Amino acid sequence: MRKEDVVELEDPPRFDYGVKVCSRKVIRNDGTFPGRQVGDVLVDKGEVGYVASIGTFLQQFYIYGVYFQERGYFVGCRAKELDPVDEE
C-alpha cells in the first residue's frame, strides 16, 4: 500500500492544539498562500511554530494550521512535515 493510500483520519490527529512543532523541511507556497508567489519559501527547515487549527483535506489527511511566530504566518502543514518540540 502506498503511503498516499493511507487515510490519516482513521486515527486521532498526531498533534493537538497549542503543541509546539518545528518544520522538518523547507515549506514552499503551493499556490494556496495568498500574497506570495508559487514556490516562495514560507517556512525554513527547523522553524518553530504552534498548532493553531486542525482541519482535513480530501477526507484523507489532517492539515495542521501552524502559526510560525518569527515570520508571522499561519501555514497549513501535513503531519509528515512537522516534528514535535520537547519543552523542558
Image: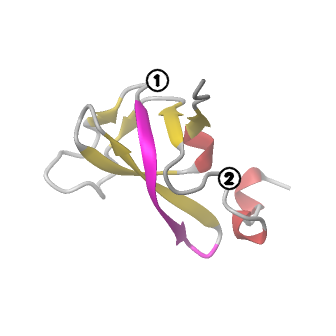
Q: Which residue is mark 2?
A: 14
Badge 2: residue crowd in 10 Å (few <14, some 14–19, many ≥20):
few
Which residue is more in the foreground, 35 or 4?
35
Find out whether residue 56 is within the magenta segment. yes
Residue occupying the point 61% across, 76% down: 59
Identify the magenta region: 48-59
**Residue at image mark 1:** 46
Which element type, helix, strand or loop, lies under badge 1? loop
Of the residues shown, which amino acid type is indicated by label 2? Arg
Q: Which picture quadrant has residue 4?
A: bottom right
Mark 2 or 1 closer to N-term?
A: 2
Q: Image quadrant of residue 48?
A: top left
Q: Is residue 79 magenta?
A: no
Does residue 22 lie above or below 54 as drawn?
above
Q: Amino acid at mark 1?
A: Gly
Magenta span: predominant SS is: strand
